[in-house]
């Protein structure tokens, strides 16, 4: 569903040099799968997700969403992808209902179907009580759900979320991840990036760890722990640190 | 929905506009600026204006109001002077008493009583006569009278002016008597009399007409407020969305960047139109109320029947300005990453545009369709043509229509260009995600080996124009000094400054390379020279052909000075000053720096066309004289195209050199070929004939052959590049 193939992104630095933000990243997210994209700040997560969302043009390589190439068919990609950026991205002066309606129009949903679609999203995201309240007066959790609803308005098969739990408290983050789990169950391919590994450790099917613009490890939680912390019980976080440090922890050597 | 592409684009743009409008109308700040500001501004302006005019008018009326006056006379000839004054009082009809006191009493008083009489107010002024005064009046000299007024009850200006008016009449009576006693006819004193006649009857008169000032001020205010209507919505539309983090949600919608920009434009345009409507309604309501409070005679009225047409033309022109304002505000604020930054950027632009709008009110500024094409000023030109200026009647319907069409066409074209610029800026990843603080600030000193961006490209142009403006009064009239100083101050100094600051890759920025390999270099350079030479002669022929339209004194003066320079100086010095220096300096600035910045890193045919057009327009304006602008614009287009096609500055320099060398060639041949000298002199009164037909044909052939050579060389060079080595 989501294919990232040798994706490269270089920026021109202020000092005249080249910043290699993404340097040949490849991975796949299947339908009905939730994949966590992990990495430190500046690892290249956001650049990768922005290229997937067609906000940035790849320097080399490509990516496909539901068969549409980000280079050659960006509009097709946008029709098949829901994207939630790191900022909540919700207009303060519009209500959740108006936001869903306006983005539904942008996605070409027939006017007759718009109220029904907005209503079902409000129901699905538990936003009925604040459906007609300006988004500026909503809580962070509610705003994040509105943002997710905006990304889901055209019922895309693939979802990309950039640090979606950043601004949320523990309860809000859990509710959002439960919701994403339900969407995965409904067959959506979900790719999300985060720093908060413990939140998604048990919720994602697989993980892709990138460091300095390259994939340094990928696999299930168990697979990553077995590969990077062999021979002992460990958490995803331990495997993450080992992977970005580029070394396997020797058995019994401690965290 | 499966809609055709253009319908999908329109639907997306309208969806964005609808979303934005919903946001705008919920923003109290926007509503206040859009509706309340104009509703409050015009009444306040009208009240203060009416108050000021009324006060001034009352003062004038008080001066003009006839007063009662008692004049005391003393001395040997007091009785005879009183008799003369009484005769003037009795003989002058009411129509001849303009400015006189209402009542004038003349009395004989004793000199000893004068002080007390003046202080008591019993007499307004006192005149002491001397012996022989009346005899002097009958002779040919000027009799000097001294009037004394009270020190404690000083006479106001009205007393002085009214008594002076009376004495002028008395003087005329005395003069008439002198003429009669000399046996001369009375007509000696009135050699000419004029009466106005005409089909349209007497022109509208107003004793102190302030219509022009009021209408001009209101039109400039309308321009500023229309811009203000676009100010906050435009900031909110893109910079505000960036600040709130919502712009990305739009950019991942299934539509093109152009659709998003058009949607944003429709939203801002709608608010700006609402501002315009609020302004027009406020102006109309305020005018209806406040005109009746203005003193009589202050405002001339429009002829019946032309009011509606004038208002329609004005409003239509300002609809074009609303579009222009919306597009300008969007284009200026798109690079900003926050509302505050956008405000800081947009405020000086609004001030600059207001100043441009105000220039059409300058005395001596003539209207017309050409001036109507100037953005933000043309709309006022249309309005003034339709409304008249109070002292002049409205222009003819055809002139108004032509001006209106020119203004609307100009607004549409400039709006479209600005929206293209907005789309280009919005799509720029550097600007979108890293902000102009890093990528686009003109004060940011970029790393070596970078090309200038659009803003940086325009900086030396602005500095150059400022240099031209400030040195024009200081430059000596001798062209041997004037040309190098102007090139130095307006071209080289700004260019050197930005080069030092920006540290660009000189070779890349200035296209400092040979145009092609092998023998085709010669073909390109010869082609460029032929085109340059041909263009000069064709331009000169066109100038001579339309010479009847009038050439300004400045243009003639400059041409005459150039001819003198070429004839008086050694050929090599004249060639250096007229051709070599401008060709190198101006090419480095316009086709080197400016064009490189406008073209940017990601060149596309569309962007190249716009870039070539903009630098050509700047090149034309840089030459200041309107008569030369069509030719310099065409030359700028050719030179820009040469650089884009050959990717080298050298052909452009050769073409420019050939163009500027032609005056020397023409003057050298002038003795042999009649009419050629006129081409150089630029249409002096002495040169009446156009260029000989064969010269025009040769110029056209030279241009055509040059273009063919360039095309062939470029195509072959392209083929060579594509061929695998």
Image (cartoon, rainbow, N blue to C red):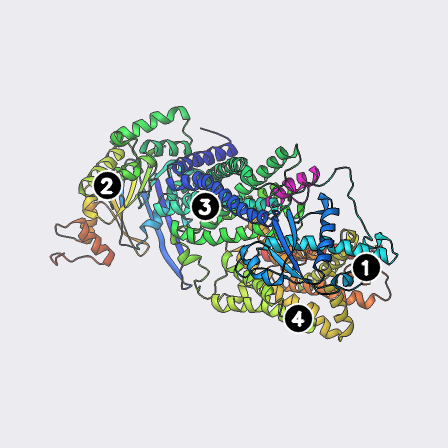
Mark 2 against mark 4, which lies toward the viewer? 4
- The residue under label 2 is A205
Residue furthest toward the left? A252
Q: CA distance from mark 1 to mark 4?
A: 25 Å
Local secondary structure at mark 2: loop
First of labels 1, 4 by sequence position: 4
Local secondary structure at mark 1: loop
- The residue under label 3 is B231
Local secondary structure at mark 4: helix
Q: CA distance from mark 2 to mark 3?
A: 49 Å
Q: Which mark is residue B685?
A: 1
Q: CA distance from mark 1 to mark 2?
A: 90 Å
Residue furthest toward the top? A112
Task: Find residue B639 and report its horizontal and vertical position in percent.
Answer: 65, 58
Q: Residues within 10 Å of mark 3 (few under 14, many from 20)?
A: many
Q: Residues within 10 Å of mark 2 (few under 14, many from 20)?
A: some
Identify which residue, B57 or A157, lies in the foreground.
Answer: B57
Magenta residues span B375-403
First of labels 3, 4 by sequence position: 3
B545 left or right, relative to A250 = right
Is-magenta flag for residue B420? Answer: no
Task: Find residue B157 and report its horizontal and vertical position in percent.
Answer: 59, 55
Q: Are marks 1 and 4 in contact (CB under 8 Å)?
A: no
Task: Find residue B467 and report its horizontal and vertical position in percent.
Answer: 57, 65
Q: Residues within 10 Å of mark 4 (few under 14, many from 20)?
A: some
Is-magenta flag for residue B376? Answer: yes
Task: Find residue B217 and report its horizontal and vertical position in percent.
Answer: 55, 47
Q: CA distance from mark 1 to mark 3?
A: 50 Å
Q: Do discs 1 and 2 share a chain?
A: no
Q: Which mark is residue B97?
A: none
């Amino acid at each position: 569903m989501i294919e990232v193939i040798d994706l490269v992104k270089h920026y021109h630095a202020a000092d005249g040099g080249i910043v290699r933000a993404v340097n040949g990243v490849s991975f796949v997210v299947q339908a009905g799968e939730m994949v966590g994209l992990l990495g430190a700040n500046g690892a290249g997560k956001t650049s990768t997700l922005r290229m997937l969302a067609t906000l940035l043009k790849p320097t080399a390589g490509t990516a496909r969403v539901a068969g549409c190439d980000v280079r050659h068919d960006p509009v097709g990609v946008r029709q098949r992808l829901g994207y939630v950026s790191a900022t909540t991205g919700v207009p303060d002066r519009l209500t959740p209902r108006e936001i869903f309606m306006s983005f539904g129009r942008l996605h070409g949903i027939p006017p007759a179907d718009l109220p029904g679609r907005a209503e079902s999203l409000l129901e699905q995201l538990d936003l009925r009580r604040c459906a007609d309240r300006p988004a500026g007066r909503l809580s962070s959790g509610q705003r994040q759900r509105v943002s997710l609803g905006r990304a889901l308005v055209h019922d895309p098969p693939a979802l990309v979320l950039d640090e979606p739990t950043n601004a949320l408290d523990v309860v809000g983050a859990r509710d959002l991840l439960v919701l994403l789990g339900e969407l995965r169950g409904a067959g959506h391919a979900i790719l999300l990036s985060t720093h908060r590994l413990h939140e998604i450790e048990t919720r994602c099917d697989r993980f892709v760890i990138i460091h300095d613009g390259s994939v340094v490890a990928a696999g299930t939680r168990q697979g990553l722990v077995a590969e990077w912390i062999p021979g002992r019980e460990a958490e995803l976080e331990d495997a993450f640190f080992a992977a970005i440090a580029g070394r396997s922890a020797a058995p019994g050597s401690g965290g | 929905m499966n809609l055709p592409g253009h319908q999908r684009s329109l639907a997306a743009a309208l969806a964005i506009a609808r979303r934005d409008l919903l946001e705008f109308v919920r923003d109290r700040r926007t509503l206040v600026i859009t509706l309340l500001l104009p509703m409050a501004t015009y009444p306040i302006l009208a009240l203060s204006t009416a108050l000021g005019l009324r006060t001034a008018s009352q003062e004038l009326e008080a001066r003009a109001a006839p007063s009662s006056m008692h004049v005391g006379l003393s001395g040997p000839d007091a009785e005879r002077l009183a008799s003369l004054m009484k005769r003037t009082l009795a003989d002058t009809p009411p129509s001849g008493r303009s400015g006189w006191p209402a009542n004038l009493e003349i009395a004989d008083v004793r000199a000893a009583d004068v002080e007390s009489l003046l202080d008591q107010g019993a007499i307004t002024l006192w005149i002491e006569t001397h012996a022989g005064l009346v005899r002097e009046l009958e002779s040919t000299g000027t009799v000097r009278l001294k009037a004394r007024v009270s020190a404690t009850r000083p006479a106001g200006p009205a007393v002085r002016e009214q008594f002076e008016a009376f004495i002028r009449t008395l003087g005329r009576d005395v003069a008439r008597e002198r003429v009669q006693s000399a046996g001369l006819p009375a007509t000696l004193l009135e050699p000419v009399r004029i009466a106005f006649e005409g089909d349209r009857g007497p022109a509208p008169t107003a004793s102190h007409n302030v219509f022009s000032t009021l209408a001009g001020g209101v039109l400039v205010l309308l321009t500023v407020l229309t811009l203000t209507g676009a100010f906050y919505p435009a900031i909110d539309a893109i910079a505000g969305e960036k600040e709130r983090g919502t712009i990305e949600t739009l950019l991942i919608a299934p539509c093109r960047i152009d659709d998003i920009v058009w949607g944003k434009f429709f939203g801002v345009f709608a608010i700006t139109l609402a501002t315009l409507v609020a302004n027009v309604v406020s102006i109309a309501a305020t005018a209806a109320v406040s005109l009746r409070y203005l003193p009589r005679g202050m405002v001339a009225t429009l002829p019946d029947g032309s009011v509606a047409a004038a208002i329609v033309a004005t409003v239509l022109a300002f609809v074009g300005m609303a579009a222009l304002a919306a597009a300008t505000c969007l284009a200026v604020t798109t690079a900003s990453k926050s509302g505050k930054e956008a405000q800081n950027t947009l405020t000086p632009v609004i001030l600059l545009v207001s100043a441009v709008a105000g220039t059409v009110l300058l005395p001596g500024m003539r209207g017309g369709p050409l001036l109507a094409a100037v953005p933000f000023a043309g709309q006022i030109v249309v309005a003034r043509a339709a409304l008249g200026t109070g002292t002049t009647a409205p222009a003819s319907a055809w002139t108004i229509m032509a001006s209106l069409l020119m203004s609307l066409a100009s607004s549409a074209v400039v709006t479209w260009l600005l929206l293209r610029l907005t789309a280009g800026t919005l799509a720029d990843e550097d600007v979108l995600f890293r902000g102009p603080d890093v990528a686009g600030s003109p004060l940011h000193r970029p790393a070596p080996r970078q090309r200038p961006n659009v803003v940086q490209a325009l900086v030396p142009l602005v500095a150059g124009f400022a240099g031209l403006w400030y040195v024009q009064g200081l430059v000596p009239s001798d062209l041997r000094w004037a040309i190098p100083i102007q090139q130095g101050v307006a071209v080289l100094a700004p260019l050197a400054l930005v080069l030092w600051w920006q540290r660009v890759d000189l070779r890349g920025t200035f296209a400092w390379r040979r145009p092609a390999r092998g023998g085709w270099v010669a073909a390109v350079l010869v082609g460029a020279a032929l085109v340059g030479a041909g263009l000069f002669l064709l331009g000169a022929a066109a100038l001579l052909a339309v010479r009847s339209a009038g050439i300004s004194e400045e243009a003639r003066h400059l041409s005459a000075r150039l001819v003198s320079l070429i004839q008086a100086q050694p050929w090599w010095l004249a060639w250096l000053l007229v051709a070599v220096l401008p060709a190198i300096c101006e090419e480095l600035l316009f086709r080197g720096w400016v064009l490189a910045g406008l073209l940017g890193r990601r060149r596309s045919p569309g962007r190249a066309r716009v870039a070539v057009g903009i630098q050509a327009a700047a090149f034309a304006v840089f030459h200041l004289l309107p008569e030369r602008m069509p030719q310099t614009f065409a030359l700028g287009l050719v030179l820009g195209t040469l650089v884009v096609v050959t990717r080298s500055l050298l052909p452009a320099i050769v073409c420019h050199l050939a163009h500027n060398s032609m005056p020397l060639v023409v003057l050298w041949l002038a003795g042999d070929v009649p009419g050629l000298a006129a081409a150089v002199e630029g249409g002096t009164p002495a040169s009446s004939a156009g260029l000989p037909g064969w010269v025009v044909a040769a110029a056209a052939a030279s241009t055509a052959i040059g273009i063919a050579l360039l095309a062939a060389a470029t195509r072959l060079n392209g083929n060579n590049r594509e061929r695998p080595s």
